[in-house]
Structures are given as C-alpha cells and as structure tokens.
Image: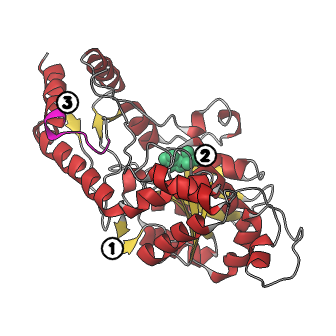
Amino acid sequence: MKIPFNKPWFTGKEPHHMQMAAIFGQISGNGAYTKKCHEFFIERFGFGKSLLTTSCSDALEMTALLAHIEPGDEVIMPSFTFVSTANAFAIRGAVIRFADTTVDYPNISAQQISELITSKTKAIVVVHYAGAACDMNAINALASKHKITVIEDAAHALGAYYHGRPCGTLADMATFSFHETKNIICGEGGMIALNKKEYFDRAEIIWEKGTNRAAFHRGEVNKYGWVDIGSSFLPSELISSFLYAQLEQFDVIQMERTRVKRDYLRAFDSLNRNGFLTIPKLPDGATENGNMFFAVCRTNEERNQLLKFLTREGIHAVFHYLPLHNSPYFSPLHDGRELPNTIRFSENIIRFPFYSGLETEDIEWIAKTTAKFFAK
Ligand SMILES: *Cc1c(COP(=O)(O)O)cnc(C)c1O
C-alpha cells in the first residue's frame, strides 16, 4: 500500500517523558504526568474537571455510572456511531433508543431526539462526527426542559468549537479518545471531562475502583476504603507521560491536521462541485479540527467500487459505521423504526487516508486517482 489509512505521528519526546516517569519512580496511575495532563486540558479548554482514562470506551462507562443509569432507563443516541457509545449504557441495562442523523450531516438530529423523549429518558448522548459539533443549542434546550443528562461523545472533537465554545464543555459531561487514529494519541487512552460540580467527587471515586483514594492522597481523609461502585479507569503514568509529550505539541499537531484537511478540500473541490461525491458542509456554529476527511458517494455500489479501485492503486480508504440499530446484537432489541439517513451515510461514506505528514502532493494524487475512477 503506497498510502496507508493512518500513520501515528510522534513528537519524538515520548520516550523521554516515559523514561522520566520511570525515574520519578511512580508508574501506577494518578501521578505527576497524569496531573500535568489534567492541568493542560482544564487550562486550555475550561473543563470543570478532567480525568484521564484508559480509553474513551472507559470514559463512556464512567458517564453511565455518573448519570446513575439503571435497568430500564432510556438513553437516546445516534445509531451512526462507534459501538462503544452504546455499550457503555447497554451494560448498565439501559433501553437504547437510536435516533437518526440529520439529512445533510451525519450528526444526531435534534428533531428526532424530541420525538423519542419519554418520562423514562435519563440521558442523551451526542457524537460530534468528524469533530463538527451537533446542534447543541436545540439539544440542550430539550434536555433542560425534560431534566435529562446530556453527554458528549467527543472522541473526534478535541480542539473543535461550537459558536466559540470548546467541544467537551457543551453538556454535563464529555468523553475523548487518544486511540492512535485520533488527533492526539497514546496508543489506547481517553478522558472524561466534567462540567458540573456535583460530579467531581464521585467521578474521582468511580475512577479509583470505588474508593476515596484520590482524596486520601491529597490528605483530605486519613484512610481510604470502598465508598461507591467503580473500576480501574485510570491509566498508568507510562501512558500519561506519552500523552504529555503529545500535548506539548498540541498546536503543531492541530495545525498540521487542519492543513491536511484544507488540502483535501481544495483537491476534491471539483469532484464535489460536479456531484460525483458530496462533501457535507460544517453544520451551523461548528469548526474544523482536522479529525478526518470523508465524502458521501451517490450509491453504496459506487462507494464499494471506489474503495476497491483505490486499494488497487495503493490508497487505503475505508468506510464506517455499521448502523447499531441493525447490528447482530441490537436488531432484535430495536423498536423497528427506520433510520434512513443513518443507512444512507453508512452505505455511502468513504474516509480517505488522514495523518500528520500526509503531503500535499499525495493528497492531490489521491484526488486525481479518485477522479480517474469517475472518468471511467
Ligand atoms: C474512537 C471512538 C470511540 C472509542 O474510543 P476508544 O478510545 O478506542 O475507546 C468512541 N466513540 C467514537 C465516536 C469514536 O470515534
């Protein structure tokens, strides 16, 4: 393959910081590097509190615990998302109500959410697809009217804004991913951001196996014990030191990834204008954060042929997501509603290679090769 789908980008300082963590001598979690990462996020984005986790999946599980999700509670979320968004609530026994996306952009539709709200609705989970914020003004208005918790799955949305406010501060709590396919990486890793004081203490307890160990470390209590349910959601210092090296270069990484995105938009402009592919416009109030480049093909057949064609030419493009409401696990549980926009995006979306260091010439070649497919 000449151009892979993803290539993790390293600042070069990762081994240094990992070595420093080992020299400091504490390599378990919640040490000096973990704190430095928390401080970075709070200072930079104004989250009320931030806790690193071992993945975004874990952070989502924490949100379900914090929101007191119990068997039978209803949770509204998009079907067009990664499986972890749903799993976190399914394992608590929630009844998941999958909502369709908007027509123009694969973000959850506020209109659909309003139709699914019942007296049992406990939470709404939104996914800012490709870093473009959902219609949070409408969604938060619905949630506050019905007293429902709102959670942002912001796995794509680090460094993205909505009407000037950072993603991750737009709801009660938010989750992020540092998996190697995201903007900022540490192999496997994540974070929960909390924007309501009432969550702060309990989040720390859930994070530390249901104990008040974090408060003990600060000297606030003289012994620690089992005070609530929880798990081991915190990463080791080896992971957080790696992540810290990436955060030191946060602006460089974001600038480079938005450059890649700009190059793509320029290179694919004529394919978009001629209607061979559609590149959805950013929704109202959303900004670009260089998360990914995707386009919507006219048909599923054409999308699949294009993927094959590109593979033969040495370009690794991919598709996603398989709709969760139709999945082998969930389809027997689904209420039968059709989600036509979800199906269309799932069948027709193509994601092109995207990583720091993907050269302008490579992007132009990818566009030319794609144009060759449509000229056939
Ligand atoms: C990547 C991703 C996740 C899962 O992140 P992990 O850190 O791999 O657990 C969850 N939701 C969305 C929308 C994602 O893209």
Alpha carbon separation for disc pair 2 and 1: 27 Å
Q: Nearer the viewer, mark 3 or mark 1?
A: 3
**Alpha-carbon neighbours of circle 3 within 10 Å: few (<14), some, or many (≥20)?**
many
Amino acid found under the numbered disc labelled 2: Ser
Residue 236 numbered tag: none
Picture coordinates of residue 314 (x, y %)? 27, 20
Judge by depth and name the residue closer to the eye, 3 or 82: 3
Does any atom of ligand 1 lie closer than 8 Å to the CB of label 2?
yes
- Mark 2: which secondary structure? helix
- Number of the label disc, if any, that sits on residue 366: 3
Label 3 CB less than 8 angstroms from ligand 1: no
Residue 341 in sight: yes
Q: Percent position (x, y) of residue 315?
A: 28, 24
Tell me the quarter of the picture where residue 138 sits: bottom left
Q: Which mark is residue 84?
A: 2
Residue 306's spot in the image, x, y percent?
28, 22
N-terminal-most mark, 3 or 1: 1
Per the model, the C-alpha gap separating discs 3 and 1 is 33 Å
Which badge, 2 or 1, comes first in the chain's sequence? 2
In the foreground, 314 or 94: 314
Amino acid, disc 3: Ile
Calculate the distance from the C-alpha at mark 2 to the C-alpha at mark 3: 31 Å
